Image (tube, rainbow, N blue to C red):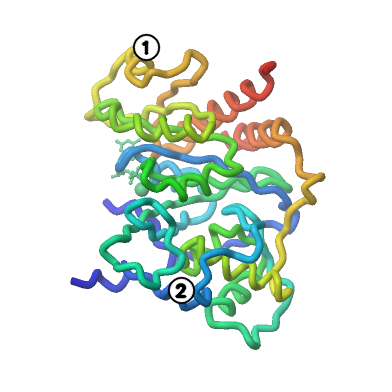
Amino acid sequence: MDSAPASEAAEPVYLPDTVRTAVKLLIVGHFAVGKTTFVGTLSEIRPLRTEERMTQAGAIVDDLAGVPDKTTTTVAMDFGRLTLSEQLVLYLFGTPGQSRFERLWHDLARGALGALVLVDTSRLRQSFEVMDLLEQHGLPYAVAVNRFETAPAFPDDEIREALDLLPGTPLVSCDARDHESSTRALITLVDHLLTLDQEPE
Amino acid sequence: MRPPRDERALVRPHVVTGGRAHPSRNVFDLVTLVIAVSDRTTGLNPEQRRIVTLCRGGALSVAEIAGHLRLPVGVARVLLSDLMDSGHVTTRAPAPSARPPRLQLLQEVLDGLRARL
Ligand SMILES: Nc1nc2c(ncn2[C@@H]2O[C@H](COP(=O)(O)OP(=O)(O)O)[C@@H](O)[C@H]2O)c(=O)[nH]1
Ligand SMILES: [Mg+2]
């Protein structure tokens, strides 16, 4: 039942010498929506995890001198890698969307091409915070419903309305455990990013 | 009550970074690719030595280096920027002018993902 990656056991897998450019996409959503599963399904390396210590106020703690343990908390992000061509590597960062981790978000959002928001139809409200964050950071996104057997199936227009999606924001459904389905969700996102980029201002 | 050992950080961040919270350079994004350019590890602290040893084998991103060495990204950044200053590591990236434009990158990502289906 533990889908958390264990960093310590993984041997480093180096990038091919020809790779020159690295890009990143964020996989975001609330707790237990399937982020770690999604990253693990697509990654060519065993997913890695880093743990950042933050103050409760959300500042990253790089220097613990004088910071009592009680006021710090740990936020984990896991990430995976896909070498897409001889020159290009894509990193996927799975991260919870909590606005109190402001600095971490700033770091993650900087230079990211866009984000895929995973949602669970039985807990749509829990996706609001992360979607607000993406909008605040001006990060374009697509939404993927991660299908849990126990979750109610709603028509797309009801989900769009509940999440208050813009008409152009793609809404797809996926199974984070399935390679093809997860790849298709990412393709939908990148296709959307291309469309946004080609639109006249 | 203390947390179980594997939930505790292996190092006290302020010890490894000499108390500094900010790197001397601002080049290390999470996906900046890093490679070691020197085998020398004399004079380095143990954490810096682990980074140089890890990065000898080839290029890895800053996030991967942090993940493998179980360091918070902020700490890895400080260590990496010192190692860059001392000539132990370098970044592998096209010159800013040679970085493909966003539209071209997105198209390459799309093509790469489609090829995986
Ligand atoms: N049925 C079903 N279960 C899933 C799916 N994706 C993830 N899970 C399960 O949901 C639980 C939480 O997933 P996880 O990836 O850890 O969520 P995270 O907290 O967002 O990283 C795990 O037990 C997964 O095995 C899915 O698409 N369908
Ligand atoms: Mg997770």
> For mark 1, what is the residue?
A157
Q: Is residue A197 above or below residue B77?
A: above
Q: Residue at x 29, y 26 (%)?
A: A121
Q: Residue at x 56, y 82 (%)?
A: B45
Side of B48 where A86 appears, left or right: right
Q: Residue at x 62, y 60 (%)?
A: B60
Estimate the x, y position of residue A158 in percent, counting from the top left.
Answer: 32, 13
Name the subunit of mark 1.
Answer: A
For the C terminus of chain A, give its image quadrant: top right
Quadrant of res B85: bottom right
The front one of A98 and B62 is: A98
Estimate the x, y position of residue A97 in percent, counting from the top left.
Answer: 38, 40
Estimate the x, y position of residue B95 in percent, counting from the top left.
Answer: 79, 51
Q: Residue at x 49, y 21 (%)?
A: A170
What's under tag 1, amino acid-wise? Asp
Whole-number angstrom distance, CA of label 2 to CA of label 1: 51 Å
Answer few, some or many: residues within 10 Å of disc 1's Cα (few below 14, many 20 plus, some between 14 and 19). Answer: few
Instruction: Please tell me how many numbered marks the rendered image carries.
Output: 2
Q: Are marks 2 and 1 on the same chain?
A: no
Ligand 1 falls in which quarter? top left
Quadrant of res A76: bottom left
What's under tag 2, amino acid-wise? His
> For mark 2, what is the residue?
B14
